Image (cartoon, helix red, strand yellow):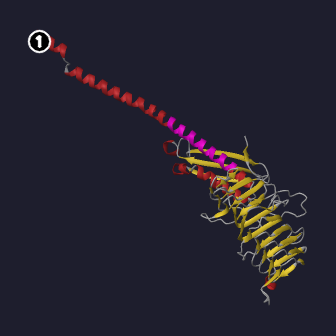
Amino acid sequence: MSSRTLIKGQSGLTHHSWISHKSQRGQLAVITGLAAMPLAMIVAITVEMAALTAERGRMQSAVDAAALAGARQASLSVASASVTNYAVSFASQQVVDLAPRMRISFTATQSVNNTVQVNGTANRDSFFGNLVPPGGFTIRVSATADALNQQPLCVLGLRDRNKQSSIWVSGSGQIQASNCLVHANGTIRSTELGRVTAGAISARVRAFGTGFSPSVNTGAMIIQNPFQGRQIIAKSECQKEQGEDEVTYAGTSNVTLPAGVHTQRVSVADQAKLTLGRGDHFFCDGLEIKDEGSLRGEDVALLFERGSLIAEDEAMLDLTGRTTGAWAGFLIAADFSNQSDMVISSPNVNKLLGAIYLSNANLNIDTAGMVAEDSRWSVVIAQNVNLSGNSRLVINSNYAGSGVPVPVGAGNNTGPQQSGARLRQ
């Protein structure tokens, strides 16, 4: 009996021993739980701080990119307010995915020498209801970029509708503007063998095609019309009724047309030669040069109330813009109400020295030759600039010594703008 009792005692637990063992296990669980709490906090803090470091990196990258983008835009002859707004918007787009968990704000400033600084602040919740640290985590970042390499504005497509091209080069057409800026307020497009070569190329919306050198800076800001407000002031004379609809110079005639208001449409045909006298020429109903006719003029401005300039067939043009007066620097300009396109389809349009300004009309070039290659400088600002066929528009930028001043807002007369940017270390 005692033997069985001894064996039973060796092979099992007494009631007292079982309770003691259970108590020990419970104490161990409590101790383990208490030990796990700081470990979990350490893990949570480590994860949170790693996320905070990554977010700080994202914020810094955002202001770096925005400062560079702003400095590039500052170089493209745009107003300071537009540059800073663009930089702020650009930075915000870089961290849009962080916005749901952070309160983010950016500011930007532009100095007189086109240095752009972008500052960013982000606030996010911290531990224990923002008690540690008080008010949550705050990230502050800053970046400064300088604009580089002067790029005068020489071709501007004003049309700013998203789905329409401001500049379109098709066929084998080319724009050659090697030392200046070609900018589209909408889309710039090259199709077939069309090419655009420039010191810098930018577009607000998109670039279609591959014929661009250098590559297009897309997402750029709108460049405001630098000649906004320019008006043709011969309206009253142009509204007078005339007995003739057109005056034509034909055959082999050689005529000099004095500056002033030309109320009838002017046509030059056959082998006639028309020379424009020095001064401002107001055309009430357009000017057409065709066949083998020629048009020459120095120190002239061709101002179109209605109609436009058309050069076709084998017509020859040799024109130099105004050197003085209200229209100094301009060669061709159309009233805002004038939607008549300027058309060049002749291969003999050699010199167009000065600014061509079609505020609400297009420049259409479709020829087998070069256009404006003999000009020391040219500036084209139009709703649309369209090249097709084998045409080649040559935009030179030899502003010094031309005798024709560059109008304020174009060419090299846009202040200390530059293109390209570098981030300060």
Q: x, y (%) of residue 315? A: 80, 70
> Badge 1 local density, few (<14 within 10 Å), some, or many (20+)?
few
Residue 149 placement (x, y as % from top left): 78, 49
Q: Which quadrant: the N terminus? A: top left
Please name whichever residue, 425 or 230, is drawn nearer the observer in this view of the structure: 230
Q: Residue furthest left?
A: 1
What span is colored magenta in the figure? Answer: 46-68
Q: Residue at x 77, y 78 (%)?
A: 286
Is residue 227 rendered to the left or right of residue 172? right
Residue 188 drawn above or below residue 20: below
Q: Nearer the viewer, residue 263 or 337?
A: 263
* In magenta stretch: residue 47: yes
- Residue 225 visible to an observer of this rendering: no
Examine the image and state in which quarter residue 406 appears. Answer: bottom right
Does any portion of residue 11 appear in the rendered image? Answer: yes
**SS for dot 1:** helix
Q: Position of residue 89 (x, y in %)?
A: 63, 55
Which residue is at 48% across, 37% downward? 44
Amino acid type shown at disc 1: Arg
- In the picture shown, does residue 240 fall above or below 104? below
Q: Is residue 109 above or below residue 330?
A: above
Q: Quadrant of the C terminus?
A: top right
Q: Check disc 1 and report the residue beneath it.
A: 4
Q: Position of residue 176 (x, y in %)?
A: 75, 56
